[in-house]
Amino acid sequence: MNYQLHHLSHTDLDGYGCQMVSQHFFKSIMFYNSNYGKEINECFNQILSTIQNSAQEKHVILITDLNLTMEQAKEFDSKINICDKEVMLLLLDHHKTGEECARSFDWYFLDSDRCATKITYDFFAELFGKNKKLEAFVNVVNAVDIWLEDKPEFELGKVCMGMISGAREVNKIMFPEQNSQYLFSLLSEAQNYFTCQNAHIALDDAIHSIKKHFFQEANTHTNTLSNLVSSYNVKLLSKNRDKMQIMYKEYKGILTYNIGNVSVIGNDFLTANPDFDFFMDVTSKKTISLRSNGNVDVSKMAATIANGGGHHNASGGLLSTFKDAFIYDTIKNQVVTIISSKG
C-alpha cells in the first residue's frame, strides 16, 4: 500500500479496538484518538497539518467509532478536496446519529448492527483475509460494545472495557504515541487469557500484573505499580523537557497536563532534573499543582498566577482564564500567556 494511513478513533475499548485491527493489516500508521465535539476538529486539523508537511504524497484518513455532525462532515470533506496532497477519507461507524451524514457522503459508512471494531475488521478482512485470533478479539469487543448479554464473550468484554477506561497511567495529550503503545500492549496481553477457564475472572485477576509488566524494564528491580509508572513518566518528561519547559521570572519549570500523582511524579522529576526549579501540572478543571526543589517558593507563585497558595515546596491554585484544549502546544501557550500577564 503506497499510502500513509492516519487513523483517528474514539478513546474507549471500541475505538482502540479499531486501531488494533488496522495495526494488524497495515505497517505505516499514525494513530490519533479523540472524544466527541471540538476535539474531533482539532485532531482532524492536526492530521491535515501533518499531511501538508509530509514528503509522502498519498494519504488515507481513516475515522472509526466517531460519528460526525453534518457541519463537521461538510468541513472535513471541503478540506480534503482543497488539500495539496492526494487524500482519501474513510469513516467506519455504528452510531445511528450519523445517518444523515452517511446518506450525504460516500466516504461515510454506517452500520448500527455491529460495533466499529467489527465493522473495521470485516472491511479489511474482506480485502486482505481473515485472522482467527484477531477475530476472537473483535467478537469480545462487539459483544460488550453493543451489549449482547447472551454472548459468551460478554463478560470478558466487560473486563476489557474496564481495563481500557482505567488505564490512565500514560497521558494521551502529552504522549499520544506512548499512550497508544501502552493500550495496545494491554489489549494484546489480555488476549492470552481468552482461552482460559473462566477467562473473564482470570483476566480480571491479572490486570495489575499486566500493567506492571509493561512498565517493568529489563534489569530493573521489581517495584510498586505507582513507582514504576512514575519512573516511566519521569523518563518521558526528561526526554521532552526542552519542549515542555516554561519560565516563571528567573525560575525554570516544566508544564504537564493532567499527569496525575503529582506528588510522586513531580518530586521524582525534580530529583532527576536538578536544573529545573519547579513542576507545574494543569488540569482540565483549570486547577494547577506546583512542586518545587526548594529554589522557588511555589506558594508565592501560586498566589501570584492562580489566586492560590500552600507550602514552600507544594502548592496549588486555579487558572480562571484557562480554556481546556486537546493539543499540548495549545495548552502550553495558554499557560505561558497567563504567567506573563501576571508579571
Image (tube, grey):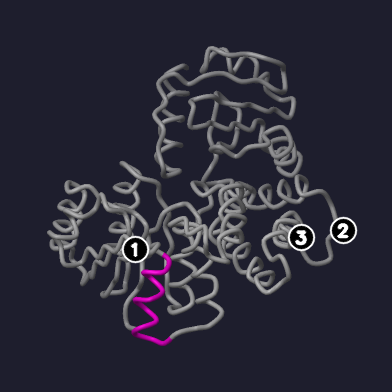
Q: Residue at x 59, y 18 (%)?
A: 301
Disc with the residue nearer the chain's start (3 vs 1) = 1
**Alpha-carbon distance for marks 2 and 1?**
48 Å
Q: Are marks 3 and 2 in contact (CB under 8 Å)?
A: no
Q: Which of the pair 210/45 is nearer the observer?
A: 210
Classify mark 3: helix, strand or loop: loop
| Relative side of 49 to 14, left or right | left
Which labelled disc corresponds to residue 113?
A: 1
Magenta span includes 154: no
**Horizontal and vertical percent for residue 101?**
18, 55
In this rendering, is residue 89 above or below 34?
below
Q: Which mark is residue 216?
A: 3
**Relative height, residue 219 to residue 286 (above, below):** below
Instruction: Please give the name of the residue rendered at 46% of the width and 57% of the height, measured from the top-left corner.
Output: 145
Quarter of the image for residue 269 reads top right
Labels 3 and 2: the sequence-earlier one? 3
Circles 3 and 1: CB distance less than 8 Å? Answer: no
Q: Which residues are magenta?
A: 117-129
Q: Quadrant of residue 50?
A: bottom left
Classify mark 2: helix, strand or loop. Answer: loop
Residue 184, x across and y down, in percent? 57, 64
Which residue is at a point 53% across and 52% down the rendered structure image? 175
Can you give x and y, in whole percent of width and height, for residue 243 in the image? Answer: 51, 46
